[in-house]
Image (cartoon, grey):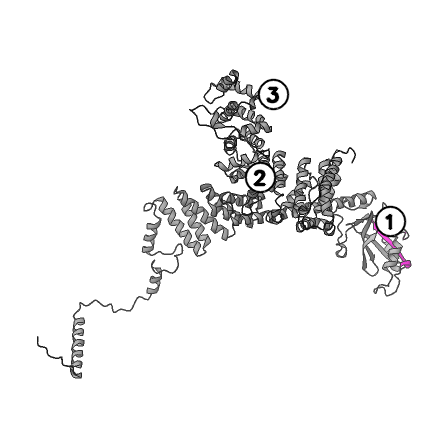
Amino acid sequence: MENQPKKAMTEEERAALATKLDKELDEFIANLPKRERNNEPPDENWLEEFDKHPFFMKKLPEPGEEMHPLYEGLQQLKYDPNENTPDELAISYKDDGNFNFKHKNYRMAIISYSEGLKVKCGNLEVEATLYNNRSACHFFLKNYRSCIRDCEWALKIKPEYRKAAARAATACLESRRYEDAVQFAEKLLEMKRDDEEALDVRSKALAFQKEAERDARKQKAVEKKRRKKESELLAEISKRNLIHEGGLTIDKLKPKFQELMEFPVDLVDGALFWPTVFVYPEYQFMDFVQEFNENTILMEQMKNVFEVNPEWDVAKQYSAQNLNVYYESKNKVFKVDTNKSLGEIIQSKDFVIRCGTLSFMFFPRGSKAETDFLDKY
Amino acid sequence: MSEACKELVKYLQLGSRLDLKDYALSQVLGLTGSEEGLDFVIDIPELLLSLLTLLSDTNLTVSKESCLALVNISAGTKGAAALINLDIAKYHTNKLVHAPNDITKTVLNFILNKDSHIADPCCMILSNISRNSQLVEKVICSIEESEFTFDVIINAFTKNKYNSKGANLHYLGPVLSNLSQSPTVRKYILDKDKCVIQRLIAFTEYKESVVRRGGIVGTLKNCCFEADYHSWLLSDGVDILPKLLLPLAGNTEYDDEDNDKLPAELQYLPEDKEREEDPDIRCMLMEAIIQLCAAKANREYVRDKNAYIILRELHKWEKDRKALLACENLVDILIRTEDEISADNLKEIDVPEDLTEKFHKMDSEFLTEENS
């Protein structure tokens, strides 16, 4: 070869070379076998088809929806008992369940796990895991009873299943089954002496249990006291031989007037305090004496009540000394001696107590209202 | 060993004819019923060894009877010592069978066997041999050498119906109480990372067995001598105080102010609440609380929990002299103010010898008084 120094390309030569190469490339491409071009525009529903394809679908098909044949095929492959051993099937369902669980679709997960258990694959590890995982779903759905039941199944299969025992303990705590919570915690401690979580659950459960038991005892004690007070009250009333319409029970003694509802007859230091109504038929008004001591003289109480003239008393007739007092009983009317104590007055065998309330009618002495009233009887 | 004895021992072997074995065994059992008989039996190591071996006999009557014989033998210190110090290697001559394990390991084996028929009497044997404070360390050593941990023993004790043949293992209570004489065992029970003492304190109100209850309370009392653990014992981690007070409480109704200070477990006790019926157990409960009151902070804690009112009511009811004394001692500590006590830790006070003597004398006079 001659050792000739290379000549530098001129601009023209470079341009010519470039054009030549371009042309060769075009020719090459043109000579490639042609592919049939579909010149029609894409199917209007191509997006729909796209979404249905099992590789591209964004959501699971709803039951009843038309399934892509490929999807059906895949399903059959996955779930066909002929194509899979029981173990594989069960694990398939387990994986489904786990997938749903991860995405917090707890109910779907439960279905998957249940299907897996229905297979009865006989593989203890798998079955225990299925129960355990299902129990976790129930836990998050707050179905504590189902959760605990599944944990117990898991533990029956695998007695050393710490996760299941731990979940059962917490579920018991949440659902206030304190004794069972302690049992599960102690089972955990048998497996692992210094299990902190178990120690914690145990002491919490015991603390709650102590309080719950104390509250129950307190309830009982309060109840007992109440009943004792009631029977003492009834005893005192019957001791006085009082007549009460409808019989003598705590229920019947409840006052019907709204103003007196909070003040049923009460026993304090051996004295009865009665809810009493002062009725003024002339003006259709009533006064309520909530706690009328049976030992108080009626006149004294009247002086109290009529200390200030009531506003409706336009004629200024209602003052203690000016009033006659009556009570109605068995379609008869009886005049009251206001110098007697309340207790003495109601002890009369003519006086009938209604709804644990005493009722008296007041008229100005010699008034027309009084006469009209007495004429009725 | 006399000829007669040699004959006896010959029949008391695993392979011996059953009727002869039975007969010989019932003779030995009869012997252990009397003082002289016991002395006789205890002095024959070969006899003790054969009894130990026969525990493993497949015939139920044989194993039961040898177990009962050993219960009787181990009841006294002499017998217990003889059993513990038995030189098995020396006296085991039958080369056809394995030498039995020492008494501790042997009975422990049966106790922890869920299907054993002799679990309960074996608990009694263990309780007997661990009672003496000189011998208990040997028992503990043997347990530590064995394949069994204290964990397993506690588990068996606290589990309901551990044994399938109806044994209730109540005597493991006194076993624990005896073992807790040793600081090692106490440290194990008081391990803060485990859940041992917490499970034991639940049994202070165990109505079904005074043996179990007494054993537990004894254990707790011993543990309360570990002053370093007092704060923890009184804290929520263990919360021992209500469990110690509950058996001492009656059905008294307190006014709201007093009631609210009490721990929840002691509030609103039902009308039929009964106190612990065994005065010794009552004593131990109070002694445990007295121990817990050593340091000032803990004294104040116990005072704040209104333990005083429980003991006040107990004092009105208590008839046993020893328990009354314990009650008064405890009330004394609770009722005085901190200024009067003026000592941070009651255990650190040096009591002069003559005063100690004087106090002991006063105590014993009180205990032997006819009138209250």
Q: Residue furthest front?
A: B353
Chain that bears disc 1: A
Residue B138 horizontal/vertical position (percent): 54, 34
Q: What's the magenta region?
A: A319-338
> Hey, what amino acid is under mark 3?
Glu
Regarding residue A255, the answer to whether it shows in the image is yes
> Hey, what amino acid is under mark 2?
Ser
> Which-is-in-front pick, marks 3 and 1?
3
Q: Which residue is mark 1?
A: A345
Residue at the spot 63% in from the left edge and 34% down from the top edge:
B210
Q: Which residue is mark 2?
A: B182
> Hey, what amino acid is under mark 1?
Ile
Whether residue B119 sits left or right of residue B227 in the image: it is left
Residue at the spot 56% in from the left edge and 39% down from the top edge:
B158
Q: Is there one chain holding both mark 2 and mark 1?
A: no
Q: Which residue is mark 3?
A: B36
Is A346 colored magenta in this rendering?
no
Q: N-terminal of the two: label 2 or label 3?
A: 3
Q: Of residues A105 and B312, which is closer to you in this image?
A: B312
* Neighbour tally class for label 1: few under 14, some 14-19, many 20 plus, Cα within 10 Å: some
